[in-house]
Amino acid sequence: MTGTGPTLLYAVKQVELAVRAHLDELLRPTGCTVPQWTALTVLSRREGLTGAELARNAFVSPQAMGDLLAALDRGRWITRTPDPAHGRRVLIGLSDAGRELLAQVGPGADAVEDRMVDGFDPDEQAVLRAMLNRCRTNLVT
């Protein structure tokens, strides 16, 4: 990359670090970490995932997912049920406490996102979302 400013990779990392700092502060009183919250938000969009599926969607390794699931269990934020189609698989879902946590934290997370895109009109926000999704797709496929 050429140019006098920071690289795009650096800019993306700086945004990620700033968002993480705000989410850490928001979540601290709940006892939930950002990786745990991320997993819960994944489950809010798609219940009944295996641990491996949740790991892929929450951007953690399968090994790290084991510890993360143990913490989510301790918080009583998830359910685990046997998969009726596969005897040894366990499906993970949100518990009522997990839904309550997301409802409690949701407005604060929305405020972080609103602050991040302050000054962007709705069309610019849509373009940014599409471009970031395309960047992610380019890197994971």
Image: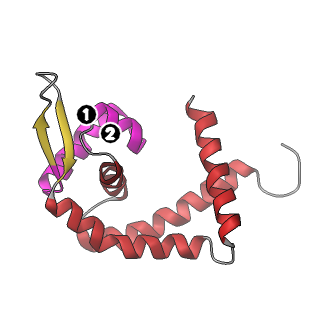
Q: Nearer the viewer, residue 29 or 39?
A: 39
In the picture shown, does residue 44 fall above or below 124? Answer: above
Q: Is residue 4 left or right of residue 46?
A: right
Q: Which residue is mark 1?
A: 50
In the picture shown, does residue 139 fall above or below 37? Answer: above
Q: Quadrant of the N terminus?
A: top right
Q: What residue range appears in magenta? A: 51-78
In the picture shown, does residue 122 fall above or below 12? Answer: below
Q: Residue at x 62, y 71 (%)?
A: 117
Q: Quadrant of the C terminus?
A: top right
Extreme residue in the right direction: 3
Q: Amino acid at mark 2?
A: Leu
Q: Secondary structure at mark 2?
A: helix
Q: Quadrant of residue 31?
A: bottom left
Q: Amino acid at mark 1?
A: Thr
Q: Which residue is mark 2?
A: 54
Q: Magenta span has 119?
A: no
Q: Label 1 neighbourhood size at 10 Å, few (<14), some (14-19), many (20+)?
A: some
Identify the image's colour scheme: rainbow, by chain, secondary structure or one colour.
secondary structure
In the image, residue 121 lies at what x, y percent? 69, 73
Q: Residue at x 12, y 56 (%)?
A: 76
Question: Is the stretch drawn in magenta largely helix, strand or loop?
Answer: helix
In the image, residue 90 lies at what x, y percent? 16, 32
In the picture shown, does residue 27 fall above or below 47? Answer: below
Q: Secondary structure at mark 1?
A: loop
Q: Residue at x 54, y 60 (%)?
A: 17
Asked if disc 1 and disc 2 are in contact, CB closer than 8 Å, the reply is yes
Q: Is residue 100 left or right of residue 109?
A: left
In the image, residue 67 lies at what x, y percent? 23, 42
Q: Quadrant of residue 18?
A: bottom right
